Amino acid sequence: MSFRNLRICFAASLIALCATYAVNLQAQQAPAQTNATIPPQAVLQPAELVQMLDSSAKPLVLQTGSHVLFAEAHIPGAEYAGPAGTPAGIDALRARVNGLNKDSLIVIYCGCCPWTRCPNIRPAYEQLRSLGFTNVKALYLAQNFGTDWVDKGYPVAKGR
Amino acid sequence: MRRVGWLLILSLLPLLFSAPTGQLPLAAQTATHGAVVGHSAANFSRPDLSHRKIELSSYRGKVVLLNFWATWCEPCLTEMPTFVEWQKQYGSGNFQVIGISMDDAAPEVIATVSRLKLNYPVLMGDEYLGAAYGGVLGLPVTFLIDRDGKIQARYQGASLARINSDIQNLLQSH
């Protein structure tokens, strides 16, 4: 093989590697964005929350999504705090946590849409953090509240 | 030069196998909660955004695509232009799309319907309507109802190609 051919092969391999990297990067972009705004240590799995709800030290659980979906089914004891993807929802969230100790355990959840495309969970998390709350957990609902909570047989309450 | 060509092809092979990771096939993501498939679709009678009474039972004899959505639901907004196309394409062949907004208030819905130029009726839903359809606890959710008013499929995360195929099958089944 001539030196020229070798150079062509090297260039082609380099292009292929870059393209492969770009494809994978694109595929992983959504979860990466999620982790960028909600750190892994702040993400709570549904089974963990069920354990917390069974304990004596229950957290404040706030649903920060749709009121209609909340009325249809929500986590027992959870409060509706407004859709955090809107200014009105952020105001409602701020009002609800006003006066709480900054180290209070607050669990937020939405579950309106798949986790990576939820318009509410990240704004809610960021708002609480910016207000100085240090113990905020975001409930991880991969697909939605129905699939990842109700279908799992976890406790549910209804009504507004 | 032929060897170079083979090497070039071999070096590009990784591209073929570098499918997005961590994703199930769309059809496999179809949710299973709300076992309403195979049952009669719950009837409802409500005004749409134009104050026209929409009664599901009046669509007997047509294949109905019932789509639950919301203005804040990005995946919903992505698929709705396709429903507009289906309404144009199949509307004359006994097919009807009906949208149910699960938003909390109508003004934003009216603006979105106008922006997306929806050519099918949209009405406001609530928790009662969601419950009547086995629980609408995540959006979008779409039901395909046959000419006899029976729910033939429930889609959540299914591909539009699959829904389209099912619509065509139902339209041809009578």
Image (cartoon, grey):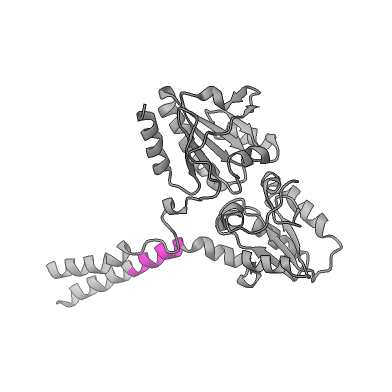
Residue B47 visible, this orientation: no
Residue at 52% across, 60% down: A30
Residue at 48% across, 39% down: B38
Q: Is residue B101 above or below residue A22?
A: above
Q: Main secondary structure of the magenta part?
A: helix
Residue B47, image x and y in percent? 65, 26
Residue B82, image x and y in percent? 46, 37
Looking at this rendering, what residue extends furthest in the front direction?
Answer: B39
- As rendered, which of A130 and B121 lies closer to the eye? B121
Can you say which quadrant of the picture contains the N terminus of chain B? bottom left
Does the segment drawn in magenta span residue B15? no
Magenta segment range?
A: A17-27
The image quadrant of residue B52 is: top right
Looking at this rendering, what residue extends furthest in the right direction?
Answer: A99
Residue B148 visible, this orientation: yes
Does the segment drawn in magenta span residue A23? yes
Q: Is residue B111 above or below residue A120?
A: above
Residue A56, image x and y in percent? 78, 70
Looking at this rendering, what residue extends furthest in the left direction?
Answer: B2
Q: What is the count of numbered marks?
A: 0
Residue A1, image x and y in percent? 14, 77
Q: On the picture, is A32 further left or further right than A108?
A: left
- As rendered, which of B117 and A75 lies closer to the eye? A75
Q: Is residue A137 above or below residue B43?
A: below
Q: On the picture, is A57 further left or further right than B154?
A: right
- As rendered, which of B100 and A148 lies closer to the eye? A148
Can you say which quadrant of the picture contains the C terminus of chain B? top left
Q: Is residue A145 above or below residue B117?
A: below
- As rendered, which of A42 and B11 lies closer to the eye? A42
